[in-house]
Amino acid sequence: MIKRILTGDRPTGPLHLGHYVGSLANRVRLQDEYDTFILIADVQALTDNFEHPELLGENVMEVATDYLAVGLDPNKVKIVVQSMVPELCELTIYFMNLVTTATLERNPTLKEEIKQRNFTNGLPVGFYTYPISQASDITIFKAELVPVGEDQLPMIEQTREIVRRFNRLYKKILIEPRAMTGQVARLPGTDGGAKMSKSLRNCINLGDTPDQVRKRVMSMYTDPTRIHPTDPGHIEGNPVFTYHDAFNPNKGEVADLKERYVAGTVGDVEVKEKLFAALNAFLEPIRVRRAEFASKPERVREIVVEGTRKGRAVAQETMREVREAMKLAYPL
């Protein structure tokens, strides 16, 4: 049997370059080799958007359009809306008995995301337990491979622990997944932060216009120790060069810029102009495809409906096996 991939995103806004290097590029590359399911995790997005759930419907279609724009083929991948697969909620409840609160509290990804959101009225239980929900997403589709960003590795390890405990307690029916990270471990934010994040507004979105991209690039942090263009600069930890390495296909140009930057013979403006040109060239075909799909919203909706139908069929079969393994398949 062909091996399966499960991956996805929370529909909290447009996808950005961090999503691309972290996971999207691998999804596009592997869609010919794996049976691919991509989950739009709207239930998980509710955990910190519960006061404005009406925003999620629009975002679901926006994220689906981004998927198609980067080159995911609807004939090869299934785009699944999480809330339309109620079996996921059932499996999450069963998994809650296999995880301790201490384990959740040690999860570094969860701790960092809680810190970023700074919940003023207390931490919602839904957000606290979303690593368990994510484990359900992966296992219900029996995914063997999960393309993720480096920051999500603790989530995959948590899933593996849950699978091992389930298989040991009941019956070996669930697959222990492995993670695949992108070629760039983590894309920094344009503000120099450790991570590009929608909530921090330090992103370059896949659908941004050339003017928007230029504005973001020209305002990017560089080497804070470099006061004048003639000062020797640092490459390591410099976001502009991290982006050059990730998106500029002209490696000779990148090498030349690095050499001159270290020598103090090139200014930040030129380095950023070259980066803007590279990013704009990379994003242009994505913009074209995005505009095409955005002009056909009913076609996008059909793709999502069909993908969700196929995804739920897989989930229903897995849950039949889970109930039998747990002796919950009552003859009623």
Image (cartoon, rainbow, N blue to C red):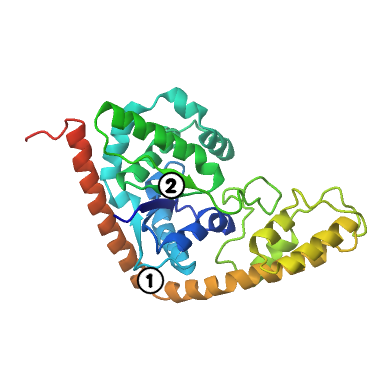
Image x and y of residue 230, in percent: 93, 59
Left or right, 180 with reference to 303: right
Left or right, 316 with reference to 153: left
- 268 and 258: which one is in front? 258
Three-letter amino acid code at the position of disc 2: Ala
Left or right, 136 with reference to 123: left
Three-letter amino acid code at the position of disc 1: Pro
The answer to whether one can see residue 242 in this image is yes
Mark on residue 33?
none
Mark 2–mark 1 Cα distance, whole angstroms, equals 22 Å
Mark on residue 45?
2
Image x and y of residue 285, in percent: 55, 74
Q: Residue placed at 71% from the left, 66% from the top?
A: 251
The answer to whether one can see residue 40 in this image is no
Image x and y of residue 300, in percent: 37, 68
Helix, strand or loop under label 1: helix
* The quadrant where residue 129 appears: top left
Q: Residue placed at 64% from the left, 71% from the top?
A: 280
Q: How many residues crowd mark 1 within 10 Å: few (<14), some (14–19), many (20+)?
A: some
- 250 and 48: which one is in front? 250
Helix, strand or loop under label 2: helix
Residue located farthest toward the left when viewing the structure as drawn: 332
Quadrant where the C terminus lies? top left
* The quadrant where residue 216 appears: bottom right
In the depicted structure, whether residue 87 falls above or below residue 25: above
Q: Pointer 1: what residue?
A: 297
Numbered label tally: 2
Of label 2 and label 1, which has the lower sequence position? 2
